[in-house]
Image (cartoon, helix red, strand yellow):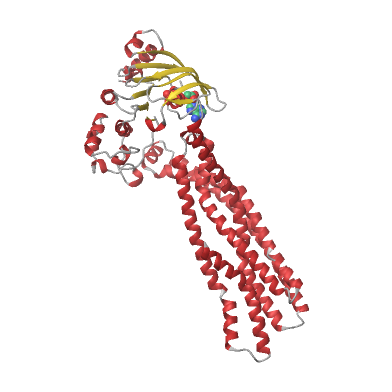
Amino acid sequence: MVALILTRLLEAVMPAVQVISLSHLVSAALSGTASPVDYILTACACAGLIPLQSVTETLQLRLQLSLKTCYENELTDLLAEMPVSDRIDPRIADSVQTAQEAAPSNLAWQATSTITVVQALATSVILCLSIYPMDATASFCALVSLLPAVLAHAWSARLENLYWPAMAAASRRADYLVTQLRFGRSGVELASLNATSAFADWAKEANRIACSHWLAVTRAKLNGGVIAGTTSVGLLAMAMMSLGRHGGGNPEVIASAITGMMSGLLATRSAGSAIGEFLSSAPLVRKYEDLKAHVRSGVCERVETGPVTQTPRDISCSDVSFRYGNGPVVLDSASLTAEKGKITAIVGANGAGKTTLVRILGGTLKPTAGTVHTVGRESISELSQDFHRYELTVRQFVTLGIQRAVNDAELFAALACMEARDFVSALPLGLDTQLGEQWGGVDLSGGQWQRLALARTVLSQSPVWILDEPTSAVDAETETKIFGGLSKTSASATVLLVSHRAWTLRAADEICVLDGGRVVERGSYGELVHRDGMFRRMFLEQRIEESSTK
Ligand SMILES: Nc1ncnc2c1ncn2[C@@H]1O[C@H](COP(=O)(O)OP(=O)(O)OP(=O)(O)O)[C@@H](O)[C@H]1O
């Protein structure tokens, strides 16, 4: 940073040094007293700007790169500490995307643009001061000739800013579509759906939209550049004519002032784009700063306030209601207690509100009304129905988030408990086999991924387990074995299990039936199957479905 400021300052004084040294050399040459030193000094002053600019540009690039890396790391930390509620908020997701795509480079540009603008300002002022004693009008015209370029760049930057969200959205969509075509799992599905050409057409259309926005911006930039350039040429011509008229025909005055002005233009040519960069990056940087402030305040808020209280044992909620934004009521005065050492199941049809209820019990969502007693997030091991298939090695995937050292024996015991030991042992590198197609690893079936994720829950030794449809992709026979293993390993944990398959819940100690956001029934599996209620109806319907598909 200091080296860049120093070289920029040196660049700023160079045009004025040229004016003075050239003026001295020409008058000495005319009077026949010019020495070789005069020639060498003038040559250095005239040609030195070129290597100096190369050095400055390299230093600027280095500074931009290191600042960009710093801001990228800061953003990564921000993402790591973001509260869970923010992670599922689509508005925050949008801000994060903007921040990730634009903020690190823009923040880096802001610093270097500021230095460039200050340097350009200093160059103009020093140059004008050096020409002023020769001709005031020429000095004024030289100063004003910089303005059109600055205005043109500022205008094109604003324009770019205006088009940027649409361009970024179109590019993102194209990227998404191409990625689906590229990856094996989605690519094969699309091919079997006969939809690869549809995806390719949509991607091309998105690329066309992004490109048309870029072209509109570059067209406007070109027009602005031509107008600004012509105006600057006019102003420079006026400055030269004025010098010719007022310089009294003195060759040293005319030669030195013209050379100085040309160097001044060269030295300040990046000022316009620097101001433009500064202006165009300002809104994105502001968005990033807002996001940072929001995340940091959110982290504090979650610890201090809200209707959620924390207890070390059971988790429960009473008379909890909830709606997403202004949408319909999803939970309506729902009450539930999950006791330590027991498996409490929530069952209900699609859309009954099961996932929403466990998210509230886990502290991810805040209820609109009612009270919740829960534990801190660090005490909860959660397996959601759409858990992510992180493409790591088996060992990394299964031990993800586990702070203590886990040896192979312990790992295999957890895998065996969740019926995953045999297929992991059969993998080419066992626990160290890379998963996922992205890195050329092994892909697993949906049920195998679920079993690995369940083994992670077992290893976590968390006091509270929230399992949302944990075996939806597992066959019935394996599912029965998994629930057997689950009952044994979760003896001291509070387990909340979500399912819409009534017959999978024989291992549950208590079952709550959710319908339209209300708990309409509760009891053990035996009690509910024999009671003439919703659970029995679901159970019978599913039995009929199951036997008709056999
Ligand atoms: N992020 C969201 N924004 C708006 N509405 C949502 C959101 N998530 C869920 N909903 C709505 O809330 C209702 C309950 O959804 P929820 O996922 O809790 O049901 P569920 O019982 O778990 O369903 P399933 O068995 O299909 O998983 C549904 O009508 C759903 O459309």
Note whether 339 is above or below 20 in the view shown.
above
- Image position of 183 (left or right of 23): left
x, y percent for residue 79: 46, 42
Q: Which residue is drawn at 56% across and 47% down?
A: 167
Q: Which residue is drawn at 50% across and 65% down?
A: 58
Note whether 142 is above or below 501 in the view shown.
below
- Image position of 523 (left or right of 363): left
x, y percent for residue 237: 72, 72
x, y percent for residue 399: 31, 38
- Figure label count: 0
Front position in the image: 248 or 115: 115
Front position in the image: 545 or 368: 368
Note whether 389 is above or below 12 in the view shown.
above
Q: Can residue 297 be seen here?
A: yes
Note whether 91 is above or below 253 in the view shown.
above
Q: Can residue 355 be seen here?
A: no
Q: Check the image and name the residue furthest to the bottom.
A: 32
- Image position of 38 (left or right of 101): right
Q: Which residue is drawn at 44% across and 27% down?
A: 359
- Image position of 45 (left or right of 497): right
x, y percent for residue 125: 68, 67
Q: In which quarter of the image is the C terminus?
A: top left
